[in-house]
Image: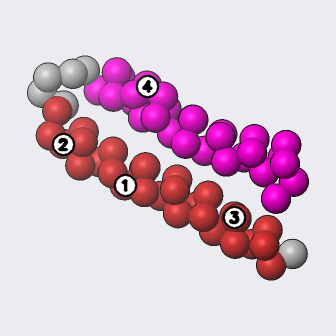
């Protein structure tokens, strides 16, 4: 049970880092790329980062 809480905390930290990091990126390049493309870019980056550890833990049971 303690390991599940630790994994959850790691996933939450990753998600918060991606979410917070995108604010800085958006401020820097919003004049060059339309905002909707930046939203999709955020999803493109966040999905593999969050899905790979989730799939790894469900397949290997760690």
19 sits left or right of 10 in the view: left
Quadrant of image for the N terminus: bottom right
Q: Quadrant of residue 10?
A: bottom right
**Which residue, given by chain and number where applicable, does mark 1 sit on?**
20
Q: Secondary structure at mark 4?
A: helix
Image x and y of residue 37, in percent: 34, 21
Decide if residue 46 is on the left or right side of residue 1.
left
- Between marks 1 and 3, how big is the CA–CA gap? 18 Å
Residue plotted at (43% across, 25% down): 40
- CA–CA distance in space, label 1 to label 2: 12 Å
Q: Is residue 30 magenta?
A: no
Secondary element under disc 1, as helix, strand or loop, is helix
Q: Which residue is mark 4?
A: 40
Closer to the chain start, of discs 1 and 4, is 1
Residue 13 position, x and y percent, is 52, 63
Q: Of label 2 and label 4, which has the lower sequence position?
A: 2
Which sits in the foreground, 53 or 47? 53
Q: Quadrant of the C terminus?
A: bottom right
Q: Nearer the viewer, mark 4 or mark 3?
A: 3
Q: Is residue 28 left or right of residue 5?
A: left
From which residue to which does the magenta span run? 35-62
Q: Residues within 10 Å of mark 2 (few under 14, many from 20)?
A: few
- Which residue is labeled 2 in the image? 27
Between discs 1 and 3, the one toward the N terminus: 3
Which one is earlier in the sequence, the residue at label 2 or at label 3?
Answer: 3
Does residue 13 lie above or below 1 as drawn? above
Residue 12 location (% of width, % of height): 59, 61
Residue at label 3? 8
Element assignment for label 2:
helix
Q: Residues within 10 Å of mark 3 (few under 14, many from 20)?
A: few
């Amino acid at each position: 049970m303690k390991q599940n809480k630790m994994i959850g905390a790691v996933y939450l930290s990753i998600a918060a880092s991606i979410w917070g990091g995108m604010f800085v990126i958006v401020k820097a390049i919003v004049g060059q790329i339309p905002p909707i493309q930046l939203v999709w870019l955020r999803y493109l980056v966040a999905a593999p980062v969050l899905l790979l550890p989730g799939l790894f833990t469900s397949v290997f049971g760690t």
